[in-house]
Image: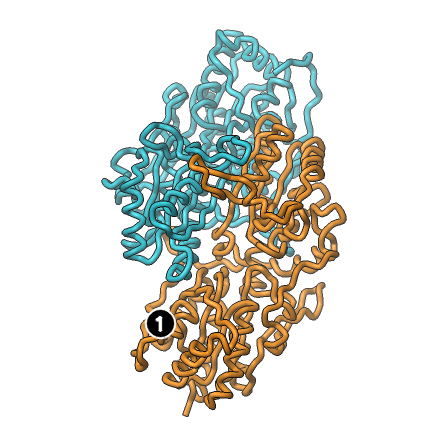
Chain colours: A cyan, B orange
């Protein structure tokens, strides 16, 4: 009897996570002889535990195809983390029960390091419980902090958004710097690793081009050196363009974003890192500033997605199905870089155990010696990931044609379960 | 003897102000028999007063063509406002001296209401000083607050950016709302008029679609009604997506953005309106939130420019040259809407006196009765302005091919002048 696939999205979404879902569903539909339905957890693993399973076979072919260019997480996602097997045995057992009740033979978990860990544990416990399920992790994270894989689907599109945005905003501030705003600061995501901030450096086509300063979470904030660098940039170029990671910390280890912003009632932490950095510039140098916080915009900007990223996101989804058909379990399709120039890559297989709960920080060699920029080796790594523009189709009113699925749930057959 | 054109950019730049410059220069180059060079003020009118004039004839044809898709202000801009003729007689006289010294017969001032006023005054004083110059205002402002013209070049592209961005970010927050962030707030520009905030409403393709709330500068912030509306949206849709104009004011008339954000040292006003609104939501309802401040990103996002906007920006530049050749002065080419469906428009001529120093606020009929959304009549007005995607070309590294001009200055012939 044919088994179903259960696919679930996990953690923060990306501009291209739905391309991965599209890769899974379209590839599975090509193998109807061997694979049953693709089910999807509503709002991720929480929905699986609640037996809220979306029947993707009820979605139109054109709508599934449109997932390829639709941002957000089309089936919903969550940050729910299953703990150790002993600690959360009830949840693991429930998970297996749900899989069993709906004839699931393949569990695809689309997320980062935590999800790889969960998928790994599910593969182990399913064997013990005598209902073996093939568990396959599918990589996704804008943070690019997954080990083993050369890069993570989702990162390239955010990188492209950040590079294009800082390039454009820098042209704006440059236009008026002689008599007005001299410093522009763009805050980007990256709590622990500076991959996204580093991508801002790609906007520099020539030496002296903006951004003039990048502030990484890997480099403790040195106010004196920073202020001197801003001053130098303004004196040299007339303005200073800055990318700051939300994860930048002061020498005391505290996030800059927490460094004292309070509202009138004394509530801490309204702001991000950008306004704090702006205030430091103004206090020290008196320059007029502007700042932007891109927040979810960067993570959902499918309108300026990287074609390479979109293609890789689809490919890891398709590969998960091929791995399943080949009988594999406890693995993840990862991206292997074959060459830089021309950029070539392929999908390989990695054991989930190698990926679980490990964070890939930026190598020291990627950050320039003064701590405020990227090195040529970083550029060589990052450049191919933003190549190509994968535009969504637009309607006649000038808006992207993003799809919302029907998300028809399967009928529940199990008793309720409190998550 | 053929006269030169002097072109200057004024005030905040737009994603398409350089398309207007391109329209001026390319059209002038088609009439070399009657028009000399196109000169451009470096950094706007300040450069004209300082006799810092860029000789655009030194720029390559391909670079001028690339202005059409390059954001920022390619010649530089400023917010310098010439006051009344009596008050600033010295500056007006200097301006005329510079025009005379460089054989300028046509002065094109590319800006908003202030610039229309300046162009008008220059036309008057030049006659009095017996060096008649044909003065033509060329419309530009992302704020869309110029009277007479149906819309202002620059606005449509910002409107498209805001509509696309809030649509995308809303898909993101919707994905995770069941267990995480429930409220997303995007802050957009518009100190006095809510045109840009209103454009966020275009993201709603169907009733109930995000954004669920728009906060306009025209509507005093009603905290109680706002909180109730957020609660309702979250209960109905699972999340609430909000666009807030930077210019929103409380019932006391103070900007919300000033409403109390202080750093640890007690400095006022680090933040924008979005973090203040976010804090109100959290205090009243306890929902997890995210916020973005798009700032210069919205004003420079040439990568997602409206094709209609880009075309109109070019057209007003080209029309300015035609007006000059027709002997006109004291006028501005404006956009006249002929029909909505299909959208058709043409360029007309308006007297500068009618445009000077007047702000076009949003009609009351554009804001829904509860004050939190746009009406069908607003939608009919706004919709055509974001139609079509005018993408810039990209290089092989995945970055837009934006041009930086040589900006060769003419040799000065006059004594220095202190601005």
User: Farthest residue toward the right?
Assistant: B369
Q: State whether residue A365 is above or below residue B297.
A: above
Local SS, label 1: loop
Q: State whether residue B310 is above or below residue B351.
A: above
Q: Quadrant of the N terminus of chain B?
A: bottom left
Out of B7 and A80, give the one closest to the viewer: B7
User: Farthest residue toward the bottom?
Assistant: B1
In-image side of A393 versus A366 (left or right): right
| Position in image of residue A412 (x %, y %) | 69, 18
User: Farthest residue toward the front?
Assistant: B87
Q: Residues within 10 Å of mark 1 (few under 14, many from 20)?
A: few
For residue B93, what is the image quadrant?
bottom left
Q: State whether residue A191 is above or below residue B97.
A: above
Any part of residue B305 in sight: yes
Number of numbered tags placed on the structure image: 1
Q: Quadrant of the C terminus of chain B?
A: bottom left
- Identified at 28% across, 33% down, the residue is A363
For residue B185, what is the image quadrant?
top right
- Identified at 62% across, 34% down, the residue is B281
Q: State whether residue A282 is above or below residue A350.
A: below
User: Farthest residue toward the left?
Assistant: A369
| Position in image of residue A148 (x %, y %) | 35, 28
| Position in image of residue B168 (x %, y %) | 57, 43
| Position in image of residue A155 (x %, y %) | 43, 38
- Identified at 63% across, 74% down, the residue is B354
In-image side of A349 versus B293 (left or right): left
Q: Return the residue at label 1.
A: B418
Any part of residue A65 in sight: no
């Amino acid at each position: 009897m044919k088994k179903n696939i259960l696919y679930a999205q996990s953690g923060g979404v990306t501009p291209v996570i739905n391309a991965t879902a599209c890769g899974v569903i379209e590839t599975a539909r090509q193998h109807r002889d061997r694979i049953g339905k693709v089910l999807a957890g509503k709002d991720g693993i929480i929905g699986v535990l609640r037996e809220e399973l979306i029947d993707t076979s009820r979605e139109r072919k054109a709508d599934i195809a449109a997932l390829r260019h639709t941002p957000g997480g089309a089936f919903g996602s969550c940050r729910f983390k299953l703990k150790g097997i002993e600690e959360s045995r009830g949840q693991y057992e429930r998970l297996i029960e749900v899989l069993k009740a709906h004839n699931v033979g393949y569990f695809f978990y689309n997320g980062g390091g935590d999800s790889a860990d969960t998928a790994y544990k599910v593969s182990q416990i399913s064997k013990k419980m005598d209902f073996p399920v093939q568990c396959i992790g599918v990589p996704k994270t804008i943070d690019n902090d997954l080990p083993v894989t050369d890069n993570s689907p989702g990162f390239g599109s955010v990188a492209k958004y950040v590079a294009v945005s800082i390039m454009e905003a820098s042209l704006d501030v440059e236009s008026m710097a002689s008599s007005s705003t001299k410093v522009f600061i763009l805050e980007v995501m990256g709590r622990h690793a500076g991959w996204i901030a580093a991508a801002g450096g790609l906007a520099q086509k020539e030496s002296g081009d903006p951004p003039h300063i990048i502030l990484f979470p890997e480099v403790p904030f040195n106010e004196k050196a920073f202020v001197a660098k801003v001053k130098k940039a303004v004196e040299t170029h007339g303005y200073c363009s800055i990318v700051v990671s939300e994860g930048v910390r002061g020498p005391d280890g505290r996030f800059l974003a927490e460094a004292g912003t309070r509202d009138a009632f004394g509530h801490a932490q309204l702001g991000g890192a950008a306004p704090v950095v702006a205030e430091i510039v103004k206090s020290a140098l008196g320059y007029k500033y502007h700042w932007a916080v891109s927040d979810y915009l960067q993570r959902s900007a499918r309108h300026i997605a990287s074609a390479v990223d979109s293609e890789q996101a689809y490919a890891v989804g398709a590969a998960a199905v091929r791995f399943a058909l080949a009988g594999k379990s406890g693995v993840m399709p990862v991206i292997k870089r074959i060459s830089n120039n021309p950029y070539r890559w392929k999908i390989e297989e990695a054991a989930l155990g190698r990926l679980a709960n490990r964070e890939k920080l930026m190598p020291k060699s990627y950050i320039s010696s003064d701590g405020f920029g990227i090195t040529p080796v970083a550029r060589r790594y990052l450049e191919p990931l933003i190549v190509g523009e994968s535009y969504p189709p637009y309607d006649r009113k000038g808006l992207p044609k993003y799809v919302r699925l029907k998300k028809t749930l399967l009928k529940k057959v199990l008793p309720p379960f409190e998550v």
